Amino acid sequence: MSRMTVLVLAALVLLSAAFAFARVARAIEQALYQVELADGAFELRRYAPRVVAEMSLPGSFEDVGNDAFGPLAAYIGGANRTKASIAMTAPVTQESSSVEIAMTAPVTQERDDASYRVCFVMPADQTLATLPEPTDPRVVLREEPARMMAAVRYRGTWTETRYRENLALLRAWIPAHGLAETGGSPVWARYDPPFMPWFLRRNEVLIEVERAR
């Protein structure tokens, strides 16, 4: 068997594994929302209320998600008062902690001049009353209200450059469709685990909006 044939077969195996990972990731519960307007990669959505487990910490745009993932994953894995396991949901999101803002997705991450807020969104059947208390004092449970969000979907790497490119596209789309930002921080949403190949990743930028007056 030639070296080229081996390389082609290896590439096919890796590609098959990547699509298998993608199917598993898509089976995870996702944040509940209704689409009010679909326009290619852009959508206007109404999100249902959710409960999140959140953690605030300083760091760079591309690093704080990794730093917060461990404590938050530990919470849903049993680092709580009842040692209960809680199902993982999607996406992972990120937004500025300098603004009080609700996000209906499993992991969120926010930033001001010094820090981000990172959250896991809890399963839809869980409430503040039913969720166990975290044993790590850095992990906090919080209820988030329903809200209307403009969103743009894209694939690719988890870089700040890609995020800002799509944020600019979304901010141009919003007023062109009779909408206005409410003043909340933009949200960066990641739906896939780190081992997902970059070209299969579902990423989004979301902004809370209202009908323009």
Image (cartoon, rainbow, N blue to C red):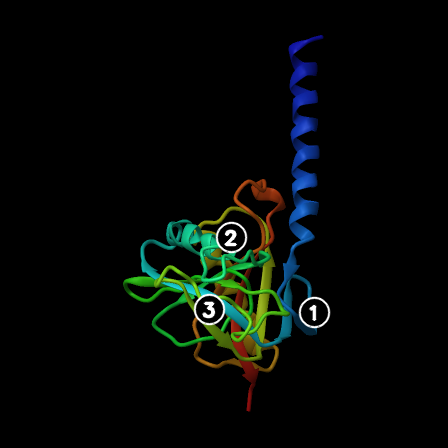
Q: Check the picture and name the quadrant holding the N terminus.
A: top right
**Which disc is residue 186 wearing?**
3
Q: What separation in Å lies between label 2 and label 3 (alpha carbons)?
A: 29 Å
Viewer-nearest of discs 1 and 3: 3
Q: Nearer the viewer, residue 82 or 25?
A: 82
Q: Earlier in the sequence, mark 2 or mark 3?
A: 2
Amino acid at pointer 1: Ala
Q: Is residue 33 above or below residue 211?
A: above
Asked which quadrant contains residue 139, the reply is: bottom left
Q: Amino acid at mark 2?
A: Gly
132 or 143, which lies in front?
132
Where residue 21 appears, as percent x and y from the top left, is 65, 41
Q: Which residue is mark 1?
A: 38
Inter-mark Cα distance, 2 to 1: 36 Å
**Of callouts 2 and 1, the N-terminal one:** 1
Q: Residue furthest top?
A: 1
- Determine crowd level at label 1: few under 14, some 14-19, many 20+ residues with C-alpha closer than 10 A: few
Would residue 19 be found to the left or right of residue 202 on screen? right
User: Which residue occupies the extreme front position in the image?
Assistant: 82
* Disc on res. 172: none
**Type of amino acid at the residue the image marks with label 3:** Pro
Q: Which residue is mark 2?
A: 77
Element carrying mark 1? strand
Whether label 2 touches label 1, CB < 8 Å: no
Using the numbered discs, state the Cα–Cα distance from disc 1 to disc 3 in whole angstroms: 19 Å
Please tell me which of labels 1 and 3 falls first in the chain.
1
Residue 213 picture location, percent across and down: 55, 91
- Snapshot quadrant of residue 136: bottom left
Name the residue: 46% across, 73% down.
Answer: 142
Q: Residue at x 45, y 66 (%)?
A: 133
Secondary element under disc 2, as helix, strand or loop, is helix
Of 199 and 67, the residue lying toward us? 67
